[in-house]
Image (spheres, rainbow, N blue to C red):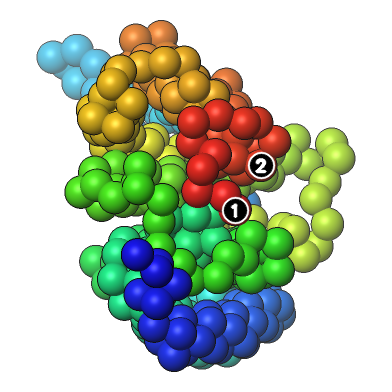
Amino acid sequence: MNLAAEVNENLAHYSNVLIYSAMAVYTLAFLAHIAEWVFGSRSAVGRTAAAITADAEAAQRAKVTVRVGGQGGGTAVLDRPKIVTRSAAGSRDVPDGPGAAGGTEQGDVYGRIAVGLTVLAFLFHAAGVLFRALSVRRAPWGNMYEFSTTFAMVAVATYLVLLALKKNVRWIGLPLVTTVLLDLGLAVSVLYTASDQLVPALHSYWLWIHVSCAIVSGASLYIGAVATLLYLFRDRYEAQLENPEGKQFGRFAKSVLQRVPSAASLDKFAYRINATIFPLWTFTIIAGAIWAEAAWGRYWGWDPKEVWSFITWVAYACYLHARATAGWKGRKAAYLALIAFGCYLFNYYGVNIFITGKHSYAGV
């Protein structure tokens, strides 16, 4: 059978054009996000977390409580309430920043433009992935190029869904669009593979189940990793608020960090994402084992892809276990989460490119 004859070259060409069009619009969204941060930081309307915290502490100091002692009622005792700067979990009681636009009208306009351009780019992007699938009438994730384009599409979709649910996640926009551009640039320049049919081993309904779960898991874990990375910077920024005599961030870095959610909120957001997606990643590995038994006659053979999928699972399990039992929050847990996501990235790029195994038949 001539497999090449089963490829619709016109649809494959349209897919490439749509992916390049999406990259162009993502670039405009990237510039709009930059303008959102830059122009939003120039207005005096936005108030820093330090100012908010200082106001709250001043209000607490000004409060007094009158306690009357004894039945004879005589002496009034003034109590100054204790000021709490850290919660029981170790996070500072600092309020969330007002979001990416910094609470400024001009910044908010650029932010809305950025989100609108991101939506438009996503539509081009999703159409490109769909046309790729239609060109060969199969799942559009049979090689690294297709996996990368679909992965980026799902990551953007996750972000847009969170926005549609009225979640305060616009601060993710700039790092997300930047990463998507890098991912698509790598896909079209290094990982590109012409639209073609799959090898017989991949002709299974498990391709739809196993790989789609891996893509959704990875895209969501990426959102959690972005929040974790921002947490580390924000946590250090809040530490500097407590010790203004130490080494300080630059002016622009401060204008950014004072407007993202508090370190405690970022830590909680990342944990919820990772905890929610961990069962799906577990199912991904189980589904892969079932597919391996159907394709190769064994559930587990310590193939490099299987090994690193398991290492990734163990890393996230350690992170969640440390949070749940050892009470790890903050920087130690953040480092564990980033190591776990690094294992996921190596499982995808490192294993596929540098290590030969049974999963190498798809090529790049």
Q: Do the residues labelled 1 and 2 touch (CB within 8 Å)?
A: yes
Q: Which residue lies furthest to the front in this view?
A: 1
Residue 295 pos. (x, y %): 30, 32
Tell me the number on the disc at residue 69.
Answer: none
Q: SS class of the residue under badge 2? A: helix
- Up-down relation of residue 22 to residue 153 (above or below): below
Q: What residue type is labelled 1?
A: Val
In 3D space, how far apart are the residues under numbered discs 1 and 2 (Cα atoms)? 7 Å
Location of mark 2 (residue): 353
Residue toward you, 112 or 251: 112
* Count of marks placed on residues: 2
Q: Can residue 326 be seen in this view?
A: yes
Above or below: residue 272 compared with residue 19: above
Q: Which residue is drawn at 24% across and 47% down?
A: 204
Left or right: residue 357 compared with residue 160: right
Q: What residue type is labelled 2?
A: Ile
The residue located at (70%, 62%) in the rendering is: 190
For disc 1, the neighbor class at 10 Å (few under 14, some 14 to 19, many from 20) is some
Q: Position of residue 51 (x, y in %)?
A: 60, 57
Assign the N terminus to one quadrant of the image.
bottom left
Q: Name the residue under label 1.
A: 364
Across and down, in percent, residue 200 comes to 35, 48
**Vertical comparison of 8 with 59: above or below:** below
Left or right side of 208 for 77 = right
Q: Which structural element holds mark 1?
A: loop
Residue nearer the viewer, 254 or 4: 4
Neighbor class of circle 2 (other Cα within 10 Å; few <14, some 14-19, many 20+) is: some
Residue positioned 31% across, 61% down in the render = 139
Considering depth in this image, is 177 or 95 the residue closer to the camera?
A: 177
Does residue 83 appear left or right of residue 40 in this picture? left
Q: Residue furthest left?
A: 71
